[in-house]
Amino acid sequence: MDQLLFWVIPVASILALGFAWHFHRQMMKESEGTPQMMKIAAAVRKGAMSYLKQQYKIVGMVFLGLVILFSIMAYGFDVQNHWVPVAFLTGGFFSGLSGFLGMKTATYASARTANAARASLNSGLRIAFRSGAVMGLVVVGLGLLDISFWYLLLNAVIPADTLTPTHKLCVITTTMLTFGMGASTQALFARVGGGIYTKAADVGADLVGKVEAGIPEDDPRNPATIADNVGDNVGDVAGMGADLYESYCGSILATAALGAAAFIHSGDTLMQYKAVIAPMLIAAVGILLSIIGIFAVRTKENATMKDLLGALGFGTNLSSVLIVIATFFILWVLKLDNWMWISCSVVVGLLVGIVIGRSTEYYTSQSYRPTQKLSESGKTGPATVIISGIGLGMLSTAIPVIAVVVGIIASYLFASGFDFSNVGLGLYGIGIAAVGMLSTLGITLATDAYGPIADNAGGNAEMSGLGAEVRKRTDALDSLGNTTAATGKGFAIGSAALTGLALLASYIEEIRIGLTRIGTTEITVGGTSVPLQDATFFDFMHYYDVTLMNPKVLSGMFIGSMMAFLFCGLTMNAVGRAAAHMVDEVRRQFREIKGILTGETEPDYARCVAISTKGAQREMVVPSLIAIIAPILTGIVFGVPGVLGLLIGGLSSGFVLAIFMANSGGAWDNAKKYVEEGNFGGKGSEVHKATVVGDTVGDPFKDTSGPSLNILIKLMSMVAIVMAGLTVAWSIF
Amino acid sequence: MDQLLFWVIPVASILALGFAWHFHRQMMKESEGTPQMMKIAAAVRKGAMSYLKQQYKIVGMVFLGLVILFSIMAYGFDVQNHWVPVAFLTGGFFSGLSGFLGMKTATYASARTANAARASLNSGLRIAFRSGAVMGLVVVGLGLLDISFWYLLLNAVIPADTLTPTHKLCVITTTMLTFGMGASTQALFARVGGGIYTKAADVGADLVGKVEAGIPEDDPRNPATIADNVGDNVGDVAGMGADLYESYCGSILATAALGAAAFIHSGDTLMQYKAVIAPMLIAAVGILLSIIGIFAVRTKENATMKDLLGALGFGTNLSSVLIVIATFFILWVLKLDNWMWISCSVVVGLLVGIVIGRSTEYYTSQSYRPTQKLSESGKTGPATVIISGIGLGMLSTAIPVIAVVVGIIASYLFASGFDFSNVGLGLYGIGIAAVGMLSTLGITLATDAYGPIADNAGGNAEMSGLGAEVRKRTDALDSLGNTTAATGKGFAIGSAALTGLALLASYIEEIRIGLTRIGTTEITVGGTSVPLQDATFFDFMHYYDVTLMNPKVLSGMFIGSMMAFLFCGLTMNAVGRAAAHMVDEVRRQFREIKGILTGETEPDYARCVAISTKGAQREMVVPSLIAIIAPILTGIVFGVPGVLGLLIGGLSSGFVLAIFMANSGGAWDNAKKYVEEGNFGGKGSEVHKATVVGDTVGDPFKDTSGPSLNILIKLMSMVAIVMAGLTVAWSIF
């Protein structure tokens, strides 16, 4: 019975892929509209695909380098698990594939959404949302498929004769964890490259088009406008998808590894097995409930904006409520020890996600005081808009941090049976909370991916010269997308933080494996020898002296905090430089190609696309390499305590910094919109100009540097996990 | 012999006060210039003093509340050292006194500097610098006097009969440490209130005066101009002085406590005594060398700008070189164990200070590429100036963090005899490095305080309508002050970080005392009982499980990181709000009082001063209380592990955030100056306007929020130290 339950997991993943295929086919059957609409859609699609090709080239080179490195470590020096090079490749491949499929769907969907909006708001919403759902379902489907595949494979090939059954499951789960490294690396380039691309194009288009030439957003006369639309796809669809693919897989795998570790010396193989498959089962059932939620998103004809928001909200809320009930049921069926309280940890995760989402909405939506006051600060010019926006973003970090802290403590206490010293189960509880938060990713990611599709539909409508009525409908869809995008960002950061914690905890398990590999059989803790296989978290912490007064830990923490800022600084500057190239090019075209501004000549869109592609390609390399190298170097210099300091310093600073940047950026964006809605003088006023400066500054905050931090948090942990073998075998201090 | 050596300390402190008195008298003998100059100086002085009076009122109330709280804890519940309430008061009193004296001198000196500049650049420099030296010497003099006084008093009154000699010295040093809490609380209000005051006035004056009315800086027609000059005194003189008074005392006291702890179970009373007085002796000799350095600052008549910079540099470098030699000599005379390597830790501290200072200069001076490129980014408008400036500041965190990390490791290894497990001496080494960095504070603070005096002299010259030649000289003095202010800020942050670390380490000693107080005689570590008095750092860490996988530690760290951002956000918003009031008032005066802009009527300066005072007074309360309450609350909820997590999270994030904000702000300031020097279009160009926006945003970055973080870092540790008794006696989890 318990063995049979496992099969729910691959079945759910295939079901997800099946529905993704179904939604994709449904969408493709719709008409792409007028020849002009098709032409624009094709240009955006071509630009997006050509960018993705470039990105995959660079990622391919980095993967090649890393595979060689891992192979030398695994087969040459034997300081690493032999499966790592292969697992790394599949993780990267599936992550890349889900980004590719999701983005391809999105680029086909935008013109169709615009065309459907000509008929009604409702049909526009349906196409955009179901196309977004393709991304959501592909991510969870491929993620869970990869997990099932590796679980079955390793279970079959790892010889059980030299290991006790409980240790075998530990080896399987820690090995599987390393495939997350591939997903992380892919996500890094997708988020960083995509983030740079989209904001270089956006900032460049805005600065010359809106500010200097005074033409509206998405105006076909702006040479950078196609690049801007391409950017939405590569940044907000492919980048966001890769980011959450990583969180999804990372949280499930880390929790499985923590579950295996928690029962390592109980001898209770069955309970250990249950703890390992519990997160996968919750995720699998979450897929089914996401599909139900997706189908529940439907409105009556002639729906108002509020109805639309209500429709999306109903779908996600339905899935959330159902997953809570389902979790209690699953864990009861599994008869997992302490099932009721562990289910509560899942609820904690969901609640943390909701609190962060609501807090993001409060601080960034123009329906609330903070953003309205931010608009008002435009009365004294752009400088006060920037000061107030930074102040707002910094203040907005309080609620999410408190939510995460309460979440950590509550999920830990629930799972550990209210016993702080029961570290193994407590950390498992934190992992389970992360899985709970991400369990309905199928539908939450659908609402995220909906945003850029609607945005592109609006762009297409504007450039194709569709009527004011259609443009009004696509604006409504776009505006809805902005709201879901802001909460989606909060969700992505929150899930990254919990996943980061779970990964961090599972790092210790990799240390155990690493020590075994170099022939260590016992560790000395407080004068007594403990067999390596029986050592607890507590033992490892004390063996390596991972206490706060160890200067190696302190050093690691300072470096970790600095890494978050350095990484942001590099990506901010990257956007600045790439945008400057774009500005030069747009100015050049306005100057040299006669008749652009009168609409007589078509600008050279392709050249702007090429510039953004090249800029992103060039600029993504340095920050990405630094993120990979820092944990390796810290490990070589300061060993295990330094690495743990680095990870926690990076996690705590990075999380707070990411919330700050995302919320400042979101608030600036909406403060500008609030003025455009006619407040404080409306469009064209001095206040509007001041808020446009805020919006432009906010672009890289919310769409490049902030989201890239999610990746940094998880990737540094992943690199540490994969490099654990090297770190235990060799470090300077 | 060794007992006699102690007397060097009070003698040096009295010498410092004597020279301060001498420099003050010398300055007072000079003429204050024309009646107009005297009138302006009197207005600034009056404004500054009336602000300080308001600030002391609020501080007085907070002190009253805290003294009552501490008294209840000490005499009522007996969970705290009985000396704390009194020690707290003297710390606060001396800190306030040094701020008061330093600022009083500065406000008398500015008109005299301007008047002397009418004669020559050189005499202007001499008056301004020696008046700055009053501040430097008062701070170190009063600081060391307070330390000597308490050492002698406690040595006399603490009964030795119930304690072994080594334990007595531990009790003395940990008790003394709590007087730093008074200094911290005073510094908090001085930095936060002063920071808000100065930038509300500055931003308000700039936004209406420079940007809207188009009149130059310090123009007498601007109603906020006196308030702006008052702000320089209350923020940059009194605030900076209180900040460094706290670092100075905190580092010496924490190091003494660490020295006492390191020898607690050696039974070697003499060596312990030496370890305790070593930091005080280094500081005492540092005072003498600072005085020598101050006298060495002199230039020939008709000195060029480079000569001036060289003169200041010569003074500080001379003191630094001499203190290195002197340290080796002092510790050799003391015959402190391992004296040679411990002296090397002092050198490490000095070097870290220099590296941070140079790095600050590189990133913020218009002589180098980063700031020049920042100016260039103004070509594409204010938004790109902000993006590039934030990018620059974030990147600039790398070198200081690496310097601090290398400093931590090196000073720890030197002092511990290259043995990581020798935690007691290792942490003592980190403390000694902080003392080394601050040993020549007498002269470094003189160069800092010189800046605002020169700035005010320039303001006075402009408002008094002195000739272009004089104005050019005061501009040169002011420009020199900007350079020293930037490096001074880096120095203040660096010293706060090292002092914070030393305080953090000495927190454990307070835990020991706190446990004794509640009757604990032994702690259980890894199954074995350790007598409390013999427990090592390592034992405490493991007894409380202060490891990185303890969810209480993790929670504390998240809250600590958040605190840094929250505190910055609150102070940023405070400046925004207070500046808005100022803008309204200046606009009102321009509108309602006829003839201001033509120079026929004098604006109502006093009203602007009152608005800034009231704004600062109102706005300083919330952030200040949060900084005091957070560690208390964290202690009550999460106990010792939570508090340590909070402190380290706040320290690592706060340090990096402070560097980022200070350097972004400094670079924006100088990027504007670089444009004003005629680059990229010069004054009045679009590029200039864009960089003015950057400069305005940078004001609260570099002068309010950034510096306030120094206080947050140290104050949270101080509160934790004072509250240690409560935390060990009672916490929820």
Image: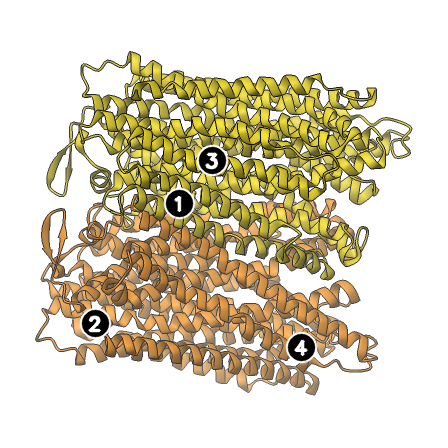
Chain colours: A orange, B yellow
Q: Residue under mark 2: which chain is it in? A: A
Q: Amino acid at mark 3?
A: Leu
Q: Position of residue A601 (x, y in %)?
A: 80, 82
What residue is at 54 percent from the left and 86 percent from the top? A29
Viewer-nearest of discs 4 and 2: 4
What residue would you read off at disc 1? B649
Q: Residues within 10 Å of mark 4 (few under 14, many from 20)?
A: many
Q: Position of residue A37 (x, y in %)?
A: 67, 82
Instruction: Tell which circle, 1 or 3, labels the residue nearer the N-terminal end.
Output: 3
What residue is at 80 percent from the left and 80 percent from the top? A593
What residue is at 46 percent from the left and 21 percent from the top? B12
Q: Residues within 10 Å of mark 1 (few under 14, many from 20)?
A: many
Viewer-nearest of discs 2 and 3: 3
Instruction: Tell which circle, 4 or 2, labels the residue nearer the N-terminal end.
Output: 2
What residue would you read off at disc 2? A172
Q: Amino acid at mark 1?
A: Gly
